[in-house]
Amino acid sequence: MRIIVGIAGASGVIYGIRLLEYLKAMPDVQTHLVLTKTARMNIPLETDWTVKRVEALADHVYNNNDLGASIASGSFRTDGMIVAACAMKTLSAIANSYGNDLIVRAADVILKERRKLVLMPRETPLHAGHCELLGKACALGAIVAPPMPAMYIRPQSIDDLVDHSVGRILDLFGMNAPDMQRWDGVASARKRVDNA
């Protein structure tokens, strides 16, 4: 399986990093990574990771200005693309088919080839323009999956929340995140609470 991972400049680069960690542990998955300039800035600001360490998680890394890269063509077969986190600027470019950089061009290719494109926008609050762009991206075929905290997992840390959100993204590709806590009904949830 080939998956393109784009990390754009929104706060929340940890979602893309954790996604790459999970995908690296899957032997049959090949990852193709593109980082925006702002993502490169946010990685050391928001995490203990360096850009070089993040890039080392991927099988292939591309310069965001390289519009001649393999992933910029529909003839390069992939199983889909995930943009985590997805900045509003990147969302706007994708929703308007403005392929001015490799992340947006690759996303446009994914849409035109009817492959799976998952966007994890990380912005709040949203104004009407953001909502319009989200709707437009959905109408084009993208799956919009903001990282929403699932409190039923009773998170003990930020990592718990990140892992659950990334696990839900992997679900969209038929991949399983190990140890992901899933909702299995009120009775099971109550039993977990009583046993805690």
Image (cartoon, rainbow, N blue to C red):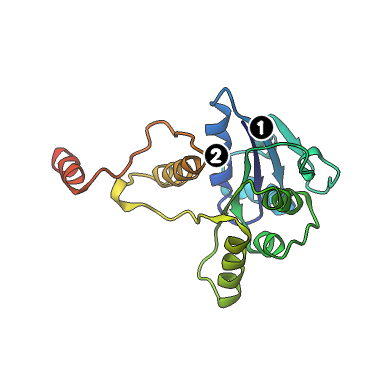
Residue 90 position by quadrant = bottom right
**Residue 27, relative to residue 33: is it above or below?**
above
Indicate the quadrant where residue 128 lies.
bottom right
Q: Position of residue 40 (x, y in %)?
A: 70, 47
Which labelled disc corresponds to residue 81? none
Q: Secondary structure at mark 2?
A: helix
- Disc 1/disc 2 C-alpha distance (Å): 10 Å
Q: Earlier in the sequence, mark 1 or mark 2?
A: 2
Which residue is labeled 1 in the image? 58
Q: Position of residue 107 (x, y in %)?
A: 69, 51
Quarter of the image where the C terminus is located: top left
Residue 16 vs residue 63: left or right?
A: left
In this rendering, the count of numbered labels is 2
* In front of the other: 148 or 37: 148
- Residue named by callout 2: 19
- Check whether the beta carbons of the residues at disc 1 and disc 2 lie within 8 A of each other: no
Q: Secondary structure at mark 1?
A: loop
Q: Amino acid at mark 1?
A: Ala
Instruction: Sort mark 2 into few (<14), some (14-19) or many (20+) by Cα contacts within 10 Å.
Output: many
Residue 6 vs residue 76, the one in the foreground: 76
Q: Where does the N terminus fall, quadrant-wise?
A: top right
Name the residue furthest left: 194
Q: Position of residue 172 (x, y in %)?
A: 49, 44
